[in-house]
Amino acid sequence: MAASDIAAREPEHPNAGGFIRDIVFGANDGVVTAVGFLIGFAGAVSNQQTIIIAGVMQIIAGGASMALGNYLAVKSQREFHDQMERVERWEMENKPEKEKDEIREIYTDMGFDHETVEILTKKVTADKELWLKVMMRDELGFAQQENENPIFSGLVIGFFFLLGGLPPLLPFIFIHPVTLALMCSFVAAVLVKVLIGYVRWVLNKGSLSRNITETVLIGVTAAAIGLGSSLVLKALGITGVTP
């Protein structure tokens, strides 16, 4: 029985770690990037239509960048995994005794006695696919997650980046003037960050308040950096677009 089948019977051990990682990372980066950009830009530019257009373009470009970047990262990781698998297969075919010694070393380091090590080594090396799996996992440290789908992973992180970046932008579309939209945008971003912190707590448990506070503080820091940038521009005499 596969490990994923065993994990499926125990909901406290979810086996969709990579999928959850992409959701949280995409949504968190989306809201952090959006609120930092919008607050900074709105502090330097007073034309609300300009802010909306710039915000939309920034979120779309950011989502595309995140999707393509994650696709390349996961694809590169998968290609490296496949290359190492080819190397291990070659070594198993051409240097079997050396590879068997490595299996013995792995189980010895786990604390098994000599007799048990020999039994396990004989069992594992009798099945080449099992042998390869053990070498990839215990010698090279590759997890099953290394084979995740790069296209799907890229689409997930890009979609949730867009989803996370949308709430801070909406107040500028529906609320006037800019100052009120700015405050509502910050509130919307904080609420999204609270939700992300709650999701982190559901997945990782621990302290609910710590998960939420830590997540919100990251968003507040991004907003502060954005606002600080706009203040620097004003101090340098670089004025924004007026209505």
Image (cartoon, rainbow, N blue to C red):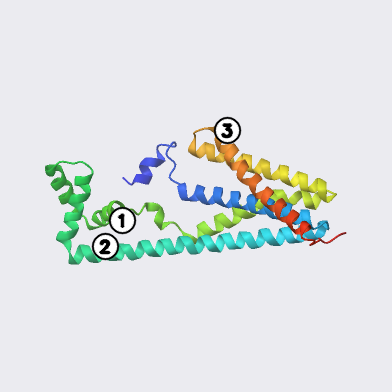
Residue that label 2 marks? 88
Residue that label 1 marks? 140
Packing grade of label 2 (10 A; few <14, some 14-19, many >=20) is: many
Decide which of 193, 126 is in the foreground and name it. Answer: 193
Residue 138, image x, y percentages: 28, 51
* Alpha carbon distance from label 2 to label 1: 10 Å
Q: Secondary structure at mark 2?
A: helix
* Quadrant location of the C terminus in the rendered image: bottom right
Q: Amino acid at mark 2?
A: Glu
Tag of residue 209: 3
Name of the residue lying farthest toward the front: 236
Q: Nearer the N terminus, badge 1 or badge 3? A: 1
Instruction: Give the number of the mark in front: 3 or 2.
Output: 3
* Alpha carbon distance from label 1 to label 3: 37 Å
* Quadrant location of the N terminus in the rendered image: top left
Packing grade of label 1 (10 A; few <14, some 14-19, many >=20) is: few
Q: Amino acid at mark 1?
A: Leu
Residue 88, image x, y percentages: 26, 62
Do callouts 1 and 3 mark residues in contact (Cβ within 8 Å)? no
